[in-house]
């Protein structure tokens, strides 16, 4: 019985030291992974910085043109959005050689009921 009591504390101590060593090793591995991720993202940001600066300069150059476009075309686009309920019912626009733009309704979509029928049977072109 004396051997069990002297062996048990030594075994427990060895087990604790072994386990704490494994935890320390695992903690060290986690820190290395964290440090590697930080270095990776820092390198990525260093590589991307010139491109981001160039993009920022391009955005500053385009800003006046985009504002002008929005000021001029905003009301017309707003009117167009009010007239068309469902854009998914149309095919992509087709530009003809003479500059005309065709917006064709998809064949499977129903014809709009909102258009009044001509009273005298004539169609204006």
Image: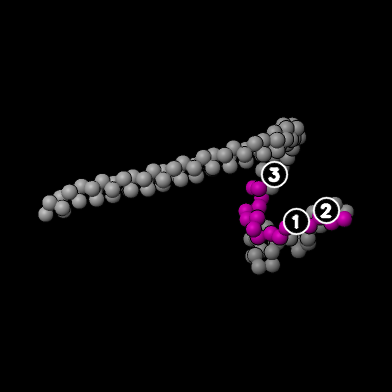
Residue located farthest toward the bottom when viewing the structure as drawn: 108
Quick check: marks 1 and 2 in contact, CB under 8 Å? no
Quarter that holds the C terminus: bottom right
Front-lying residue, 59 or 41 = 41
Local secondary structure at mark 1: loop
| Depth check, front residue: 114 or 52 | 52
The outermost residue toward the front is: 3
Residue beneath label 3, please? 77
Q: Residue furthest right?
A: 98
Give the CA distance from mark 2 to mark 3: 17 Å
Foreground disc of the pair 1, 2: 1
Q: Is residue 72 above or below residue 105?
A: above
Whole-angstrom CA distance, mark 1 to mark 3, is 15 Å
Q: Secondary structure at mark 3?
A: helix
Q: Residue at x 71, y 42 (%)?
A: 76
Residue 40 can be seen in this image: yes
Tell whether position 87 is magenta. yes
On screen, residue 116 versus residue 37, left or right, reads: right
Q: Give neighbour class at mark 1: few <14, some 14-19, many 20+ (Cα, 10 Å).
A: few
Q: Gap between marks 1 and 2, in whole Å?
A: 10 Å
Bounds of the magenta span? 81-97
Front-lying residue, 5 or 79:
5
Residue at 87% x, 55% y: name it. Answer: 97
Q: Position of residue 108 (x, y in %)?
A: 66, 68
Q: Give left or right: position of 11 versus 115.
A: left
| Residue 9, percent from left and from top | 20, 47
Reading the image, the residue beneath label 2 is 100
The residue at which mark 1 appears reads as: 93
From this viewpoint, is residue 63 visible? no
- Identify the mark at residue 27; answer none if there is no mark: none
């Amino acid at each position: 019985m004396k051997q069990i009591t002297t062996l048990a504390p030594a075994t427990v101590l060895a087990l604790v030291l072994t386990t704490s060593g494994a935890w320390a090793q695992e903690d060290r591995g986690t820190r290395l992974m964290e440090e590697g991720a930080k270095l990776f993202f820092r390198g990525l940001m260093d590589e991307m910085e010139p491109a981001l600066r160039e993009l920022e300069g391009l955005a500053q150059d385009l800003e006046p043109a985009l504002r002008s476009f929005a000021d001029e075309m905003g009301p017309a686009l707003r009117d167009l959005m009010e007239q068309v309920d469902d854009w998914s019912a149309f095919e992509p626009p087709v530009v003809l050689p003479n500059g005309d733009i065709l917006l064709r309704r998809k064949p499977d979509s129903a014809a709009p009921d909102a258009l009044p029928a001509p009273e005298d049977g004539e169609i204006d072109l």
